Image: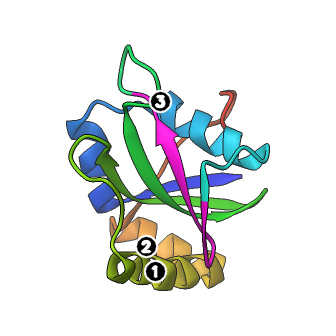
Amino acid sequence: MRVFATKEFARFARKERIGTSQLCEAVYRAGSGLIDADLGGGVIKQRVARPGQGRSGGYRTIIAFRSGDLSIFMYGFAKNSKANLSDDELEVYRRLATVFLEADAEVVQRLIDTGELKEVECDGQEGA
């Protein structure tokens, strides 16, 4: 499975010190059927632990997800700073997920080349 982060999500993860292993573990759990919330339209919400803590008080990530194939981290937030997505926000992420999940390899490569997507290397980790 290929795992990516949008430029904005990568910035959030870097700022919050969320490591690759935490992202890969979230995708691994989702691929194993352990999805925290299926938001419809190819969008899932997965919890990610704060460094040195558990998942319940950590971060929430919004992921465009196609099992066994592709995961793109689109948005992240701390549970203590935001309760949930608004209906309007959710609709935006569903539309964005549709674009990402329907993109062919050429489009994905172009997004990587322009810096809009960054590949999350999960090879050999318990994440992909």
User: Relative to residue 35, is residue 4 drawn left or right?
Assistant: left
> For the point 42% across and 76% down, which residue is it?
90
- Of the residues tagged 2 and 1, which is closer to the observer? 1
Say if 10 sits above or below 106 in the image: above
Image marks 2 and 1: residues in contact by CB distance under 8 Å: no
**Three-letter code, disc 1:** Leu
Which of 51/128 is in front?
A: 51
Sort mark 2 into few (<14), some (14-19) or many (20+) by Cα contacts within 10 Å.
some
Task: Name, please, the residue furthest toward the top.
Answer: 52
> For the point 38% across and 13% down, which residue is it?
52
Q: Where is residue 100 shown, x and y percent of the image?
A: 54, 77
Instruction: Assign the C terminus to one quadrant of the image.
Output: top right
The image quadrant of residue 24 is top right
Magenta stretch prevailing secondary structure: strand
**Three-letter code, disc 3:** Arg
For mark 1, what is the residue?
A: 96
Residue 43 lies in the magenta stretch: yes
Marker disc for residue 55: 3
Mark 2 or mark 3, which is nearer the start of the sequence? 3
Which of 84/45 is in front?
A: 84
Span of residues in magenta: 38-49
Say if 72 sits above or below 90 in the image: above
Which of 26/8 is in front?
A: 26
For mark 2, what is the residue?
A: 111
SS assignment at label 3? loop
